[in-house]
Image: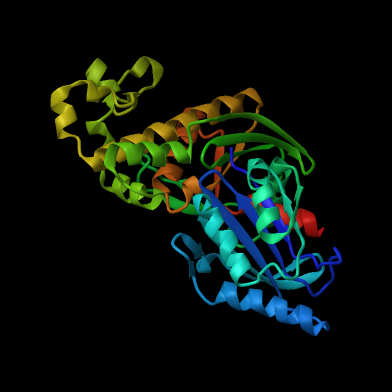
Amino acid sequence: MSETAVVSSEKLNGGLDGDEQWFGIDIGGTLTKGVYFESHCASDDHEQEAAIEQIRKFVKSSVKYGSTGMRDEHLEIKDQTIGQRTGTLHFLKFSTSRMDGFLNIISDNRLHDCRNVVCATGGGAVKFEQKINEKLAIKVEKYDELHCLVSGLHYIHHQPGECFTWTNLQPSGKGGDKEVVDFGASMYPYIIVNIGSGVSIMLVKSENEVQRIGGSSIGGGTFTGLCSLLTGCNSFAEAIELAEQGDNTKVDKLVKDIYGGDYDKFGLTGDTVACSFGSMMDPEKRAQATKADLAKAVLVTVTNNIGGITKMLAYSFEVRKVVFSGNYLTNNNMSMQMLAYALQYWSHSAILSIFLRHEGYCGALGALIKHCS
């Protein structure tokens, strides 16, 4: 399950005013995602304005921070209004394992001078509460994790081109075309599947009615961890790059390997995976499998598991719209396409799969908005 947190730009007297600039931070098991709201208003307090300008310059000075930090410049959204202020939203992320370095950067650059509260939710709020307090003398306040995620989605889906699906997919899940969808029309009820290190699945019946209905420990962290063990790769990006070059059919056992072709009685094509990594019991095939093949097989295993759980829950709760979010889908068209094809195929096109441009930032954005509203 991902953890979500928000940092509010509160003055030392504790209050929010119209000139302050805010951060939202989603502290996940693998990645920490941040949303920075750059207000276009200037402060009448010269000392406060100097502190704000320090933050603004630091964030916009680069697209890389330290060894793992980066700003997704292409996701920037201008002319946004939050809490009656107008400004620009910037999106940043870094490895959660580098939290000590992140806190050092904040301290060394005095980026915490104009705030004294971190509003947080989820496991990250608990895990790092004492460290944040000791390092930055900042108090940690906690928000509800699921509602932050949903609030972020409800804000972001209005952005042009934010929500899309995949059409004209091949049975393998490859190819296909992106098609923008209007998620705002009759959106309830829907299911949101958040794929971080693990997977959380929520049923959303209304803006304020959210229920966690399932999940899985097999998520993005599983993919990266297994790929690291099997191939020696050192990052999610490296694992995805390997998987793009691989062929999972050299690793998995398919329906046609068992039946000699399609299994028509149950609508299973011969290319359907019958047993993930099943061919690796054969020493000859094991010797032929490349690192790329293994990475692709892990990707297919994790994605198929998520798709299967999602389909069963959608049917159980009679929901026909599923939104996928989380950093597992960042730069990962393969998984998006496999999820879209699987739900379309097994539901006979009754279930619509919806994906997001800002898939990894809903939690941080939602917490920011909830705190500022």
Q: In the image, is 15 to the left or to the right of 86? A: right
**Res. 164 in view:** no
| Residue 331 location, quadrant | bottom left
Residue name at image x 42 percent, y 42 percent? 335
Q: Can residue 98 be seen by looking at this rendering?
A: yes
Numbered label tally: 0
User: Which quarter of the figure is the C terminus placed in?
Assistant: bottom right
User: 168 left or right of 209?
Assistant: left
Left or right for 236, reference 247: right
Residue pictured at 51% horizontal, 54% vertical: 98
Q: Nearer the viewer, residue 346 or 77?
A: 77
Q: Is residue 55 above or below residue 25?
A: below
Residue 38: x %, y % from top left:
68, 72
Q: Is residue 78 above or below residue 7?
A: below
Q: Quadrant of the N terminus?
A: top right
Query: Can you give x and y, in whole percent of width and height, for residue 303 in the image?
Result: 43, 36
In the image, 120 versus 99, the foreground residue is 99
Single out the residue that lies furthest toward the front: 134
Counting from the top left corner in percent of width and height, residue 20 is at 77, 71
In which quadrant of the rendered view does residue 224 lie? top left
Above or below, 193 against 118 in this view is above
Q: Residue at x 79, y 84 (%)?
A: 46
